[in-house]
Image: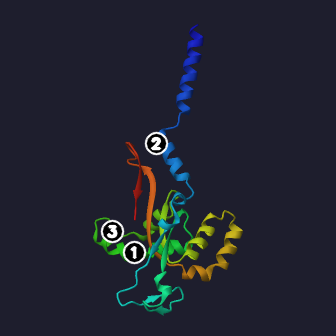
Amino acid sequence: MAKSKKMQQGKKSSKRSTKIDPQKQLLAEANAQMDPLSHLPSAFLSVPLSPPHNGVVADDDGQTNSDNDTSTQNNMAFIQHFSSPLPPNILKQCLELFQMNMGDMYRQSSWGLNVEEKLNELQHDDARFLVVLSSASCAETTTNEARNDDADTAEAAQSDNDTTNEKCMVLGFAHFRYELDDYDLPNLPITYLYE
């Protein structure tokens, strides 16, 4: 009888060891989402661009138009979700935008500006991004590149789209990760906004 109790206790302890931490499970589920924006209506994924104060707007080809031109009234930017890794052109622009907008503040702070460290953060496996792109074709092109798992096909697509990507301008981005609130004493899963 003592033997069967030990066997039952052994079974219980093996069940405990296979039990998944619910916080880590929640993070794994959040990180497994391919496109959390897919649940939103498309109207939430486009942003109207207001013309500069002088009423002149540059189109995708760099040509300027006046406020009276109907093509400028339809100028839109598009929000796209990415999981790491970002397409190289988008990554480069995000890093440049970060340096332009935040570089001085970081340099003046006690921690300073370390561009290599920031690049590593942007390339972290768990990094997620909401990127505002200059046109819908940019969003479509970069999404296809990011989702392409075949390296040979991705290289071919990259070379085919080099000229298109040069016109794809990052207007803004948010870099975030799903993490635990504290690594030493984790309490809650959170969404941590880096930039």
Between disc 3 and disc 1, the foreground one is 1
Residue denoted by label 2: 23
Q: Are marks 2 and 1 in contact (CB under 8 Å)?
A: no
Quadrant of the drawing holding the C terminus = bottom left
**Element assignment for label 2:** helix
The image position of residue 3, as x and y in percent, is 59, 11
The image position of residue 97, as x and y in percent, is 42, 75
**Element assignment for label 3:** loop
Q: Amino acid at mark 2?
A: Gln
Q: Residue at x 40, y 80 (%)?
A: 50
**Element assignment for label 1:** helix
Residue denoted by label 3: 112
Q: Between disc 2 and disc 1, whose residue precedes? A: 2
Between disc 2 and disc 1, the foreground one is 2
Hey, which quadrant is residue 86 in on the image?
bottom right
Q: CA distance from mark 3 to mark 1?
A: 12 Å
